[in-house]
Image: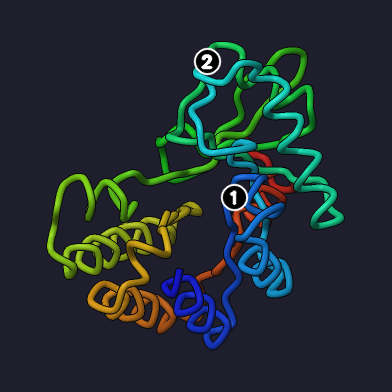
Amino acid sequence: RVGFWRLLDFLEQRGIRASTAINARVMQGAGEPVAAAMRDAGWGFMGHGYHQQALHRVDDQKDNIQKSFDALRDYTGIDPKGWLGPGLHETLDTLDYLSEIGFKFVTDWPMDEQPVTMRAGSGSMVAMPYTMELSDLPMMVVQGHESHVWYDRAVAQFDCLYEESAEQPRVLSMSVHPYIIGVPHRFLHFKKAYDYMLQRDDVWFATAEEIYDWYIENPPE
């Protein structure tokens, strides 16, 4: 979609890398040029199912996760760390499967503004901050808000977390879809929000993988 290239160009101009939650089959089909552009730009790659189907509806959930992990590793040359389930759906077994296969964090649990460690099988899984109310899909498509609402919410969220971060680190996550936020009448507000946040020198624009690594290296007391 055209919206992707608009987003990619803007983020590259600002020196920002993102993380992409991507169906593994995208890298094996007509969407491969988009995947290649993200890989070349140094983006992080997160599992998002082998294809776009909620995990509780696939025939073999563990196999789906394993094929996703393998495809991402083969395509990027790096073991993927993150997972965002299609539709954020999980079953009671999902975290155990993800941990066993090799994923390190999930963004299926929209809670908090900090990473949280959860038990998963014989190991652990980190729940990364994910803000549903700043996601363009529910905000623009489901709730039908006007385009400027995304900017208003993003800036208000940023201002609050920035003030609180003077005492303790905070994470502001924004989930966007190129075909939604990348259309011209919304993209203007996306750019404005990022340029507003970029005015602060003490804000780290990081990929999800970088935030995970920082959290592991700096565990909470």
Query: Mark 1 or mark 2, which is nearer to you?
Result: 1
Report, in whole angstroms, how far the alpha carbon at label 1 lies from the one at label 2.
20 Å
Q: What residue type is labelled 1?
A: Ile
Q: From what the image shows, is residue 198 above or below residue 77?
A: below
- Which residue is found at the position 67% from the left and 62% from the top? 32
Q: Is residue 118 left or right of residue 164?
A: right
Q: From what the image shows, is residue 72 above or below residue 4?
A: above
Which mark, residue 22? Answer: 1
- Which residue is found at the position 79% from the left and 27% from the top? 101
Q: Is residue 220 left or right of residue 177?
A: right
Q: What residue type is labelled 2?
A: Thr
Contact between marks 1 and 2 (CB within 8 A): the answer is no
Q: In this view, does 158 lie to the left or right of 81?
A: left
Numbered disc 1: secondary structure: strand
Q: Quadrant of the N terminus?
A: bottom left
Which mark, residue 91? Answer: 2
